Image (tube, rainbow, N blue to C red):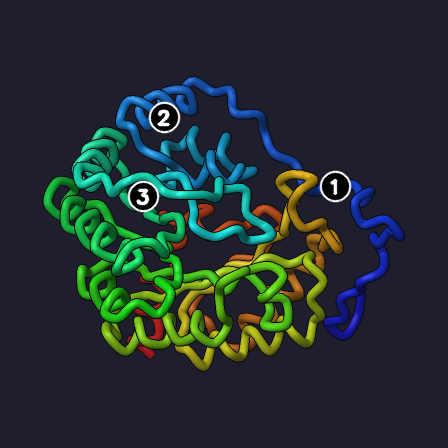
Amino acid sequence: MKNNYISNSHLRNNDKNSLKRPNWIKVKAPISEKYIDTRNLISKSNLNTVCESAACPNIGECWDKKHVTVMILGDICTRKCGFCNIKTGAPTNLDLLEPYRLARAISKLNLNHVVITSVDRDDLVDGGASQFENCIKELRRICKHTTIEVLTPDFQRKKGALDKVVLAGPDVFNHNLETVSRLYKKVRRGANYKHSLNILKNAKIINSSIFTKSGIMVGLGESIKEIEKLLDDLKYAKVDFVTIGQYLQPTKNHLSVDKYYTIEEFNILKNLAYKRNFLLVSSSPLTRSSYHADKDFMKLKSARQKLINI
């Protein structure tokens, strides 16, 4: 492979649904004692995780290390995106005790870094921003040494929602673009590419010291030029950290995989991103927004410090 060229044909098949998962995408079965201990604690705490709800392929590895991505605001989403395995329907009532239960569980796990995400809650006045705010406050109160990363929905342009979350003081603010602009109507139903970019841009304006982060999936039919345009857009929005991972079809009812990228191709994408001077880039088949988030946070701090010292 030369000149940063990414082929779109070497794994294509006339019937996309018959595209077989390559041997470089492998995960261990979740069977360790630490995995079971983490699962039991999450269950007893009555918490939801995106690890389970979204059928994350890394759940065995992450939960073995007691690293979980908590999903607040219930497990039912008000949207139905073409890639996502989370249930869609009418959400349950807001659980006011959830922030406390979350903080207590994270304290028992003794995590150095925690990631909080949520379903879309278009039914709520602020899209669920107040719940994010309260979770951050409870974590600061109970888990004083735990750094906090939030992975938020777009809040559907609800006034003041972003300010609530950012001003609550998370260490990392993450909002995923997920895919290139052309594919938004197909992949992220109800979302808007420019609005998502503005969320990231405005988060940095509200708090310039916060780390901002965004992730994308590849393998949905995007072109290399479209990926480069997306990277340019993220850089313009002053995003610090970009994650790039392979889309994996959860069920036959979800969008099919258009292409499986090779490890070499993921390295090409990583280099393209680093050429745009992001502080940190994670690019591999199994990269996900929260994968190795604790270690990556330390890398982010180190990369920023190096810039300061130059």
Q: Amino acid at mark 2?
A: Thr
Q: CA distance from mark 2 to mark 3?
A: 17 Å
Label whose residue precedes the other's in the sequence (2 or 3): 2
Q: Residues within 10 Å of mark 2 (few under 14, many from 20)?
A: many
Q: Which residue is mark 1?
A: 21
Position of residue 283 measured from the top left corner of the image (x, y, whole percent): 57, 57
Position of residue 227 measured from the top left corner of the image (x, y, whole percent): 62, 71
Q: Is residue 132 above or below residue 42?
A: below
Q: Quadrant of residue 21?
A: top right
Q: Is residue 48 above or below residue 30?
A: below
Numbered tag placed on residue 72 in the rendering: 3
Q: CA distance from mark 1 to mark 3?
A: 31 Å
Q: CA distance from mark 2 to mark 1?
A: 29 Å
Label whose residue precedes the other's in the sequence (2 or 1): 1
Q: Quadrant of the N terminus?
A: bottom right
Q: Which residue is mark 2?
A: 38
**What element does badge 1 sit on?**
loop
Residue shown at 28% from the left, 22% from the top? 44
**What element does badge 3 sit on?**
strand
Q: Amino acid at mark 1?
A: Arg
Q: Is residue 86 above or below residue 101?
A: below
Label whose residue precedes the other's in the sequence (1 or 3): 1
| Nearer the observer, 168 or 210 | 168
Q: Is residue 81 above or below residue 65?
A: below
Judged from this view, the residue extending furthest toward the left is: 141
Q: Amino acid at mark 3?
A: Ile
Is residue 281 visible in the rendered image? The answer is no
Instruction: Give the total number of marks visible in the rendering.
Output: 3
Position of residue 22 measured from the top left corner of the image (x, y, whole percent): 76, 42
Residue shown at 56% from the left, 71% from the top? 273
